[in-house]
Image: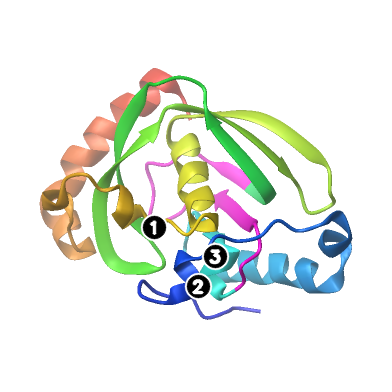
Amino acid sequence: MIREILTIGHPVLRRRAREITRDELAGAPVQQLIDDLIDTMRNANGAGIAANQVGETLRVTVIEVNNNPRYPYKPQIPLTVVINPVIEALDDETFMVNEGCLSVPNLRGEVSRFVSVRVRYLDREGNAHDEIKRGLTAGTFQHECDHLDGTLFVDRVSDPTTFSTWEQFERFHRAAFIERISRFVERVGS
């Protein structure tokens, strides 16, 4: 089922989501939430969506990039269900990425993200994962995990002059960003 995506200003987006138990994960309500998140993300052409964004304060997010028309420069990410994630930077290396968000419609801005992160999480079956993510994929995981802590990308924009609507980004900034981010992807991979 496609759910309404909450937008900036809604208090649920600023709440830290709570961890869920393995029993909750196995239950029908959380499994339905996961299905709804997948449907909602795909319907909105998102690269990911967190439970907070549909009004549920549970530490659940889904991520997928599969020839996404909003993000043609992003490497492919298979559908990944992320439960109770713990994310940590592997070093101090960062990169600047122009981000948007389904909960902040029609706004983009430059955000600093770690190049390499370690992500530990459970999948929808409760299997534990411990993975290294790099580049834009690492940025996507950081963005979605931020949601679970009540943080939006606008909180991480250090230079407000980089804010842009989608229309103005497409008109004035997209070509330079695509060139810069493509070189970055070539250098670090995903």
- Give the magenta range: 56-78
What crowding class fits label 1: few (fewer than 14 Cα within 10 Å), some (14-19), or many (20 or more)? many
Q: Are marks 3 and 1 in contact (CB under 8 Å)?
A: no
Q: x, y percentage for residue 38?
A: 63, 64
Of helix, strand and loop, which mostly describes the magenta segment? loop
Above or below for 107 versus 80? below
Q: x, y percentage for residue 52?
A: 55, 67
Q: Earlier in the sequence, mark 3 or mark 2?
A: 2
Q: CA distance from mark 2 to mark 1?
A: 12 Å
What residue would you read off at disc 2? 12
Q: CA distance from mark 3 to mark 1?
A: 17 Å
Task: Judge depth for marks 3 and 2 and give the one in front.
Answer: 2
What residue would you read off at disc 1? 152
Above or below for 3 versus 89? below
Query: What sort of colour scheme is used for the picture?
Result: rainbow
On whether residue 108 falls in the magenta region, the answer is no
Residue 73 image label: none
Identify the element where label 2 is drawn. helix
Residue flagged by tag 2: what amino acid is it? Val
User: At 61% from the left edge and 67% from the top edge, which residue is drawn?
Assistant: 57
User: At 41% from the left edge and 66% from the top edge, which residue is drawn?
Assistant: 102
Above or below for 96 versus 158? above
On whether residue 70 falls in the magenta region, the answer is yes
Residue flagged by tag 3: what amino acid is it? Met
Q: CA distance from mark 3 to mark 2?
A: 18 Å
Q: Is residue 43 visible?
A: no
Q: Is residue 98 left or right of residue 28?
A: left
Q: Earlier in the sequence, mark 3 or mark 1?
A: 3
Residue nearest the viewer, comparing 160 with 70: 160
